[in-house]
Image (spheres, helix red, strand yellow):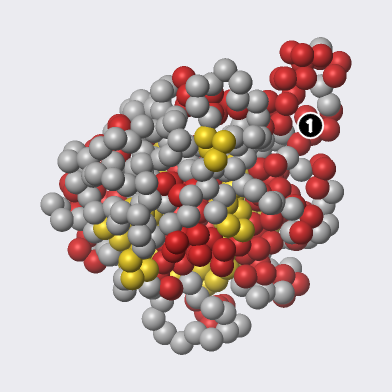
Amino acid sequence: MAELGHTNLRRVVITGLGVVSSIGMGAEEFLQGLRSGSSGAKPITVFDVEGFDHANGCEVAHFDPEQWIRRLPVEQLGRATQYSVAAARMAIDDAHLDIEDWRSEHGVISIGTTDGESRDLDHMVEAEVTRGPEHMAPELARRVPAGRLSAAIAQELRLTDVEAVTIPTACAAGNYAIGYGYDAVRSGEAEYALCGGADAMCRKTFSGFYRLGTIAPDRCQPFDVDRKGILTGEGAGVLLLESLDSALARGARIYAEVLGYGLNCDAYHQVAPNQESVGRAMQLALENAGVKAEQVDLISAHGTGTKANDVTEARAIREVFGTQPPKTISMKSMIGHTMGAASALSAIGCSLAIINGFIPPTINHVTTDPECDVDCVPNVAVEADLEIVQNNGLAFGGNNAVVLLGRYHGASA
């Protein structure tokens, strides 16, 4: 982490937010969706669902890539890359930043993903199976490399002095990407970072979760005694990070401060979470941020709505925070499981909650599972004075990433 080898560490703040989600485009619409407890769930239309007994998901609707992608040919970008580039452009615009001012500065672009452009792979496989390999479109093949999720942002914004990385640590990848950008800005290696995650819904991932028996019939109910699994979702969340000095110098609005993060990978099981490892990741984040457990006001849980995840995560939370942990919510109840974008969108939700003084609800909630035993703020948002918020990202293969965000106190335009 950033402490190693660095003595003049800088404070890092979030000054721009970009959102592509099933409950809103951009930070303002996303904020309204979170406040009102909106649901993005509806029947899946982006791929053929014939043969599945149930097929609800959280698709992005009314997305016009040409509204946000102004320089690159949209048809040369896969859907996940379109989401990634659009969210990055939104973050720049939201920060009221003239990117020309930073063109000579070194930056980082870090985007997490689970599936990359697997949606295009779906189309390629379908074409080969139904019409033969000679009908596989070469333009789809060119769109497939996952590295394009970050590289295309640099191309669209014409940033030449950047490190562009795509981080494939499954459903914790958004938090991994935030940690990567945070380290670069904090250490002075970069002046800014555009970081987050992006994924588009694809048949491959839906089918995999369906075969595991973890797709809910109609709605996602994290921490509920009758929860039946996830709803797959899609979208992108990109955050603009810069040093506090930079933000103050240009009179930027500061959503929140990145206080620290914790990562680990236990490799315990391909799909089953490990309680000890999950708890350790949270402890690492608290230690890295210099925060005590009792100082955390809210936990944005991974909260998938599966039997195993919710019980394991809730038990790990109680191990770290005691028998009365902070309120613990799941935004996946509203936007579904957006895979590599999940913890990035949750981090944006946490930032909006901090600056706007509220806690988003866990919707679709009826009765809390006694084995979970958390206050998940059922169904209706509540007003709250939040100082420190923890954002959990837990992934298959034991990849765990936890980010701590705090309210910024001080001069800000």
Q: Which of 282/203 is in front?
A: 203
Q: Can see residue 316?
A: no
Given the image, on which type of amino acid does mark 1 rest?
Answer: Leu
291 on left or right of 394: left
Above or below 215: residue 81: below
Q: Nearer the viewer, residue 105 or 280?
A: 280
Graded by Cα atoms within 10 Å as few (under 14), some (14 to 19) or many (20 or more), the crowding at tag 1 reads: some
Asked which quadrant contains residue 127, the reply is top right
- The residue tagged 1 is 140
In the rendered image, residue 24, in percent from the top left (x then y), is placed at 58, 57
Say which of 409 and 2 sits in front: 409
The answer to whether residue 13 is left or right of residue 67 is: left
The N terminus - image quarter: bottom left
> For the point 43% across and 57% down, which residue is it?
37
Vertical position of residue 95 compared to residue 219: above or below? below
- Counting from the top left corner in percent of width and height, residue 261 is at 39, 55
Location of residue 407 (image quadrant): bottom left
Q: Tag 1's secondary structure?
A: helix
43 sits to left or right of 304: right
Q: Residue at x 61, y 53 (%)?
A: 20
Q: Percent from the top left, x then y, of residue 313? A: 28, 42
Q: Residue at x 30, y 32 (%)?
A: 307
Answer left or right for 218 relative to 227.
right
Residue 145 % position (x, y) = 70, 35
Question: Which residue in the rendered view is the most extreme toward the left?
Answer: 323
Q: Is residue 224 visible?
A: yes
